[in-house]
Image (cartoon, rainbow, N blue to C red):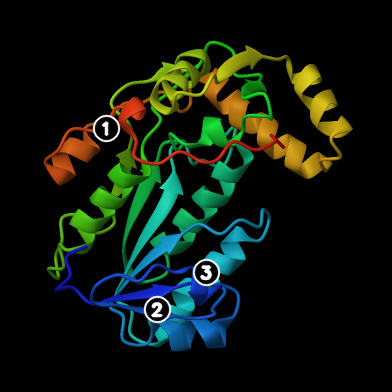
Amino acid sequence: MRPDVPQLLVGRDPSRIPELPGAQRRGPAEYADTGAMRTALTGASTLVLISGHPRGRRLEEHASAVEAGMAVGVERVLYVSLLGAAPTATYRNARDHWMTEQFLAGAGVRHTVFRAGFYASTPAALADDELVVSGPGGDGRAAFVTHDDIADVITAVALDEGPRSEHDRATLEVTGPEALTLAEMVARVATATGRPYRYVPETVEEAFARRWRLGVSGVQIESWISWYQAIASGELSAVTDVVPRITGSSATPVEQADWWPTPKTAW
């Protein structure tokens, strides 16, 4: 964002919010805390809403945040959804995103939906201690996208503040420049990081059993496995021109991403 554009950075823990030129840090504020959100959003005209984590409560929390913003003068909501969002999406979390999209459509507020592809950083985040990424992804493909590309698209739309923005009520599918299998994607991550990441395919049964032995809950396992199944199904394989069309720059190849997570034990 340009330094001459005032920003309010809202979070659950203000100490974790970065210090940016021209930006104010506000909080603590959780989406479900209407009073805190109203205080934090006072003075804002555009709300960039990043999805919360609690599965089964996302719609309620997102709606609470939007309504709190509208109550104190927010005129426009930019919502980061998920590619493939649908009521019957294979990836369970994508169903929550679809419900939030439906809420926004009837909320009476200007809004734009950004359906982002899976993050380029996610496979690395799912690797185990031996840098193995494993799951039932089959030979499906996904157009993994970098955080920076998503942020650049949102920024460009946020700065288009006219009362009749062409992006009002639009749904923009934000993807990387190519659709990759998980084996290809993990190989790119290995090249980019210099770490020996590798992909090992699993059946659904193998994936479930392994995570169950790690003490992961059934709900978490279901969500995790459905992430891989969505890739296998091809629901995340679309490649769009949104990044270059909106930002004027080519979408970033995944191996050129600026940030990768620290390896950790896969859940």
SS for callout 3: helix
Give the residue at x 47% y 36%.
Answer: 121
Locate residue 43, reporting x and y percent: 31, 86
Q: Position of residue 251 (x, y in %)?
A: 24, 33
**Marked residue nearer the N-terminal end (1 or 2):** 2
- Whether 266 is drawn above or below 134: the answer is below
Residue located beneath label 1 in the image: 252
* Disc on the earlier residue, 3 or 1: 3
Quadrant (top left/top right/bottom left/bottom right) for the N terminus: bottom left
Decide: is 189 above or below 150: above
Label 2 secondary element: strand
Instruction: List the residue tagged with mark 3.
Output: 63
- Residue at disc 1, secondary structure: loop
Q: What amino acid is found at the position of numbered circle 2 in the picture?
A: Arg
Gap in Å between the C-alphas at discs 1 and 2? 29 Å
Mark nearest the camera among 3 and 1 is: 1
Q: Which mark is residue 25?
A: 2
User: Would residue 27 appear left or right of 208 to someone viewing this image?
Assistant: left
Position of residue 143 relative to residue 22, above or below, is above
Considering every residue shown, the one lying at the far top of the view is: 139
* Most foreground residue, 184 or 59: 184
Q: Which quarter of the rendered picture does the C terminus lie within?
A: top right
Residue 172 shows in the view: no
Q: Amino acid at mark 1?
A: Thr
Amino acid type of disc 3? Ala
Identify the image quadrant of residue 178.
top left
- Closer to the camera, 166 or 245? 245
Q: Is residue 236 left or right of residue 95?
A: left
Q: Residues within 10 Å of mark 1 (few under 14, many from 20)?
A: many
- Mark sitting on residue 264: none
Name the spot of residue 157 as percent of width and height, x first.
21, 57
